[in-house]
Amino acid sequence: MSELTERTGTTAYLWVYHEGTALCVERVRASIQNVQAAWFTVGSRTTLNCGAGPRTLLGFITPEQLKFALSLELPKKTPVSQTNPKLLAREASAIRERGWELAIDDFVVGLAALGMPIYDRQERLVGSVSITTLTAQLVKEGKPRHLDLLKKTADEIGFRVLRD
């Protein structure tokens, strides 16, 4: 993740699903000039309706986990934050089909994030990795930058995960 942050100039996060929320288990923070935002710290939890890392989990968790996550209170962090469970369920399907998530202005106005699922060697979901920075630095002509590098990082992390 340090290499990801260094190469992209973004803050990188590692997320796991935990009791209907996303739990931050690692963060490598980039120095982003003139940005005053509440950065997640390791051990922080958030709902799955905002942010690319948490929303990526939303798209790839089991139907039972999705139902539970969408039954929780879903805070509206910005005017574009999605809080409608039915719409979020549809968005989860779109995230799964696309294979990644780009979230713009839904957590902090002016910031964008890109998330990718992480699978272990047995193709089981183990979490998500995301990067965030100023929207103009992550999105070019409506498309996310660094998608291939984020996928490579997710694959490398997943390969290192050992589970029974």
Image (cartoon, helix red, strand yellow):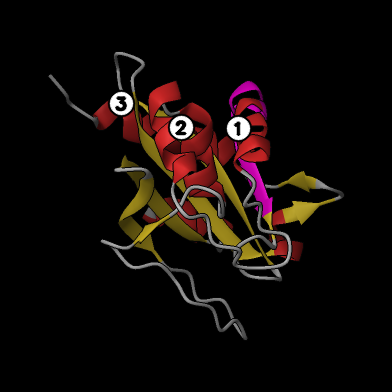
Q: Name the residue under label 2.
A: 66
Q: Is residue 92 above or below residue 107?
A: above
Other-residue count near label 1 (Cα within 10 Å), few / some / many at <14 / 14–19 / ≥20: some
Query: Marks 3 and 2, how far apart in space?
Result: 25 Å
Viewer-proximal residue, 153 or 49?
A: 49
Question: Relative to residue 93, is residue 71 drawn left or right?
Answer: left
- Magenta stretch bounds: 94-103
Q: Mark 1 points at which residue?
A: 89
Q: Foreground mark, 1 or 3?
A: 1
Q: Mark 3 points at which residue?
A: 159
**Residue beneath the point at 33% across and 29% down:** 158
**Residue beneath the point at 50% across and 76% down:** 31
Q: In this view, does 35 lie above or below 107?
A: below
Magenta-colored stretch includes residue 56: no
Q: Do the residues labelled 1 and 3 touch (CB within 8 Å)?
A: no
Question: In the rendered structure, which amino acid carries the disc numbered 2?
Answer: Leu
Q: Is residue 3 visible?
A: yes
The tag earlier along the polypeptide, 1 or 2, is: 2
Q: Do the residues labelled 1 and 2 touch (CB within 8 Å)?
A: yes
Q: Is residue 113 above or below residue 157?
A: below
The tag earlier along the polypeptide, 3 or 2, is: 2
The residue at the far right in this view is 141
The secondary element bearing badge 1 is classed as helix
Other-residue count near label 3 (Cα within 10 Å), few / some / many at <14 / 14–19 / ≥20: some
Q: Foreground mark, 3 or 2?
A: 2
Q: Can residue 62 be seen in this view?
A: no
Tally of numbered tags: 3
Q: Where is residue 102 in the image (x, y as percent from the top left)?
A: 66, 45
